[in-house]
Each structure stands twice: as structure tokens, then as C-alpha cells.
Amino acid sequence: MKPELPDDLDKALAQLKGLGRAKAPDLLPRIEASIKGNKAKVIPLAEWRRLVAAAAVVLLLNLVGLVYYAQQTSGQVALNETSTEVLISDFQLYE
Amino acid sequence: MSIAQGEALALRELYARHADRVYNTAISYVQSAVDAEEVTQDVFTKVWRSANNFKAESQVTTWVYRITVNTALTALKKRQRYGFLGALTASHDPPDFHHPNAVLEERELNQALFANIYRLPNRQKTAFILSYVEELPRAQVAEVMGITLKATESLLMRAKGGLRQALKNDYPHRGPTKRERS
């Protein structure tokens, strides 16, 4: 009877066996600084991303608001001009 | 315990003795060198701060492993909660990672293995990493996890079953090599 062939997991486990531990970089100065309370406040990348996203949303809302306001205002000016002309011709003000 | 007295020398000794264990365990969980450094730093800071609470009946190594596992799992949880743009794109996908010591020809399988370790449920992941990456005896794995030996074996069996199936799905085309067939 043929022995059962090793599958991928068996191979991966055999590879793990001889792998050894990943070597840690020298983090001792950072740890000592952190323990002494001198650690600079580091804002994690995820936090930065959320801040940038929030700022982008606020900026976008402002932009939309400005565009909307500009459109409204130009419409108002056009309306005012038209109604002034009507008023002038109706009452023949400058004649 | 001398570290409880706040001696820098004791911290250095502790670091020299346990840094590789902590870093290797951490990198197996978070699968990123930067995050593993962060976890390692956190672990040693916690060890220093809670040295007074350390119960001497538990081995120092077991205690350090326990803190490492909890810190790494917390880091993973944070990552999954705050993926890019927060919850919208919280990432549950494994990073593109292979163990730093994996040689070139073993990297593909190693990468597939770690990707699937990343997807395991936390308890199975812990049992597997401590048993097969850290190569701790089962009894110590059980002690670190605070469970019985039988429960550890059961977790490992489920983890291996899941990984075997996942690897088979990853490589449906891969059969035995010519040498294995003959």
C-alpha cells in the first residue's frame, strides 16, 4: 500500500519547523522612552486617515454650499434686473 | 522580581531574553513588521508596568506570551475596526505577508499559510501560532490560553482542518511533485 502523500498543510508545517524566530529589531530605546513617559504622542495612521476623510467631507460640504449660494445669488440678481426693467417700463420712470 | 523595582538593567535582560519570542508571535498575528514592532513595544511597556502584579507561580515566559497574545489580538481588532476610512472599508483581508525567515522557494506556500492563519477564529489562531510557529509544548499553550490540554488539542485539530481545506482551495491545481508520485 502506498503511503499517503503529504498535502500542502503538511509541507507548510514542515517548512515552519525549520524556520526559526523572526529577529526583533532593537526597540529597547523606544520602550525605555515609553516607560519614562517621554514617548512622543504618535497618532496612528488609521487616525490620520479618519481625520483626512472628515476634513474632506467638511470641505466638500462647504464647496457644495458655496456653489449653491452662488447659483441662488446670480438667479436673484437676474430676477432683480428683470423686475426693475418691468417697473421702469410700467411706470415710465425715465421718460 | 527585580524588574518590579524598576531597574533598567532588568528590563534590558528581559528584553534580551524575550524580544524575539514576542516579536515573532506578534508578527504572526498582525503580519506587518511595523505593527509587530508596535505590539512588541506595548508588550514590554505592559510587562514593566504590571510587574508588581505578576504572580510568581506562573512562568515569566508564559506570562509574557499571554500579554503578547492579548496585545496582538487587540491590535488586530483595532485594525479591522479602523480600516481605511473607518468602518466603510474595515479590512478583514490578510496582508501580503510571508514570514521574514522563509526562503525564496518556500515563500508562496508560506504566504498562503499565513493568509489562512489570519482568517482563523482568534482561539484557533492563537493555538496554532503558539504550537506551530512558536513551537511551544501543548501544555504551555494550554497554560497561556488558560484552557485545558484537551481543549487546546481540539482547537488545533479544527485549525488544521480549516487550514488544510483552505490551502486545498487556494491550490486546486497543485498535485504531488514527480518525486512524490513515484
Image (cartoon, coloured by chain):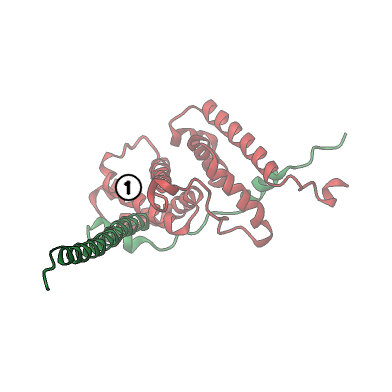
- The residue at the point 58 percent across, 44 percent down is B116
- The residue at the point 54 percent across, 39 percent down is B120
Say which quarter of the image contains residue A37.
bottom left
- The residue at the point 67 percent across, 46 percent down is B170
Image: B167 above or below B6 = above
Instruction: Please name whichever residue, B139 or A75, is drawn nearer the observer in this view of the structure.
Output: A75
Query: Can you identify the residue that label 1 sits on?
Result: B47
Tally of marks: 1
Q: Residue furthest bottom?
A: A95
- Left or right: residue A31 versus residue B59 is left
Residue B140 appearing in the image: no
Image: A16 above or below B128 = below
Q: Residues within 10 Å of mark 1 (few under 14, many from 20)?
A: many
Q: Colour of chain B?
A: red
Say which quarter of the image contains residue A29.
bottom left
- Left or right: residue B118 versus residue B172 is left
Helix, strand or loop at label 1? It is helix
Name the spot of residue A90 as percent of width and height, x first. Answer: 16, 63
- Left or right: residue A6 versus residue A65 is right
- The residue at the point 65 percent across, 45 percent down is A13
Report the amino acid beneath label 1. Val
Say which quarter of the image contains residue A36.
bottom left
The N terminus of chain B: image quadrant? top left
Instruction: Please name whichever residue, B114 or A1, is drawn nearer the observer in this view of the structure.
Output: B114
Image: B99 above or below B146 = below
Name the spot of residue B24 as percent of width and height, x first. Answer: 49, 52
Name the spot of residue A87 as percent of width and height, x first. Answer: 16, 63
Name the spot of residue A16 as percent of width and height, x first. Answer: 62, 49
Q: Colour of chain A?
A: green
Image: B127 above or below B108 = above
Residue A27 appearing in the image: yes
Q: Which chain is mark 1 on? A: B
